[in-house]
Image (cartoon, grey):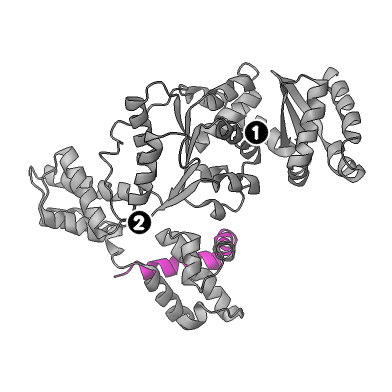
Amino acid sequence: MLLQEQWKEVLKKLENEVTAVTYDLWINTLTPARYQNDELILLAPSITAKTQVNQPGIFEKITKCVRSEFTPYTFVSIVEAHEYEESLRQTNEQAEEVETKETPTKSKFNKKYTFENFVVGKSNQVVCAAMQNVAEHPGEKFNPLFIYGGVGLGKTHLLHAVGNYLEEHNKDLNVLYVTCEKFTNDYVESIRNSKKSSNDFREKYRNVDVLMVDDIQFISKKMGTQEEFFHTFNDLYQNNKQIIIASDRSPNEMSALEERLRSRFSSGLIQDIQEPDYETKVAILKKKCSQEGYLVDDDVIDLIAQKSGTNVRDMEGILSKVVFYSSLLNKTHTSLEDAKEALKDYAETERVDLDANKIINTICEFFKVTKEDLISSKRNKEIVEPRQMCIYLINDMLNVPLTAIGTMFGGRDHTTIMHARDKISNQIKTNPHVKMLVNDLKSRLLKN
């Protein structure tokens, strides 16, 4: 009851601080959910209402009036009511699991992931240089540093490499590496569990010198988590703490990301890790052989480099499979014949020449359209549908960034490409005919 009374006093003050329309439409719809450890959680009835009251001018006035009624140090969080309730429900169901997954505040880094063990090629040399610079001068240059690229291209390796470097050369720094999932779980737990106060959460994530967050793309549809990460980001940035973020896509390609977070991510250096070329793949495989003590013919390395896709982890997995098969034959040296036998049923070996041009040509042949029409500005149904399908397949099968696909299709904006991709993606979920068509097209593309 005391919380409700205090909030009524805050509303009286806010009524004089904002316009009548803003007060009636947005401010007066807020309800206090909890006040604990100098944090007031306010619930907004909708995402629209939450967005409106979180605008800089309005949010500052809310914070000002709250602090005049509560304490001068009160931290205000405004979350959407449904999301708040859903978070409580989910964490109640997973409480035991969350507790078992709890990790120490001090991050642990994989000692195999160092700059020395990272194979540098044309596809990743700029990213690697930026990460090394940040490791040597945290908080001074490239802050924040946002790196993105497809699965298995080395983003996590580089994040751990930074951590390992700092632990060796800057032992006094508090360095924290987490996945986006871990950050979300910690945030939800701080709301749900009164024994673990929000102060503990903020102490963990804001009392660091370097914060590295992996797979940030999963924050896109978690509005409450976005809100908390926004405040965490601001606090660290204003105190010149280094922030490094990794994602499978650029900020502009994260459609459900709040604009203010997208703006923060874009304020520093954004750099992509591109797919490794043949020479880089060979160097990676040879490095793996050296580290593991594998004795492998150069022809085997060449075969794997040509037959495998761009996912480095998958490529190393293929190498391990080939060497293991050879060991089953009591051989200490793996030959080309052993490799071919080990990989005869491996699906990836069929994806030899798959590239954007092959996908475009296959779509043109299947739908009876020309390449010129496909990349043109024509908007008739006979052209739009094949174009959308082509965009979806290039992004899905090759993991090409949306901006690059936009360039292929006549310089289209990434939002247009995103719309095309998402339309096919949604149709696959709801339309069995479209799902069957996509599977058929993929089968055609994977044939030699």
- Residue count near mark 2 (Cα–Cα under 10 Å), binned few <14, some 14–19, many ≥20: many
Element under disc 1: helix
Is 212 positioned to the left or the right of 377 in the image? left
Q: Residue at x 56, y 61 (%)?
A: 418
Rendered view: 433 above or below 299:
below
> Residue 14 is drawn in which quadrant?
top right
Task: Work out whether residue 8 or residue 67 is closer to the camera in this orientation and state it.
Answer: 67
Q: Where is residue 383 drawn, in percent x and y?
A: 55, 79
Q: Which mark is residue 275?
A: 2
Q: Which residue is drawn at 15% across and 55% down?
A: 300
- Is residue 122 visible in the rendered image? The answer is yes
Task: Work out whether residue 439 or residue 181 is closer to the camera in this orientation and state it.
Answer: 181
Is 421 positioned to the left or the right of 165 in the image? right
Quarter of the rendering occupied by the C terminus: bottom left
Quarter of the rendering occupied by the N terminus: top right
The residue pinned by badge 1 equals 87
Magenta span main SS: helix
Q: Which residue is drawn at 40% across and 77% down?
A: 361
**Residue farthest toward the front in the current orientation of the protein:** 140
Check disc 1 and give the amino acid type: Ser
Rendered view: 352 above or below 327:
below
In magenta, the rendered stretch is 422-448
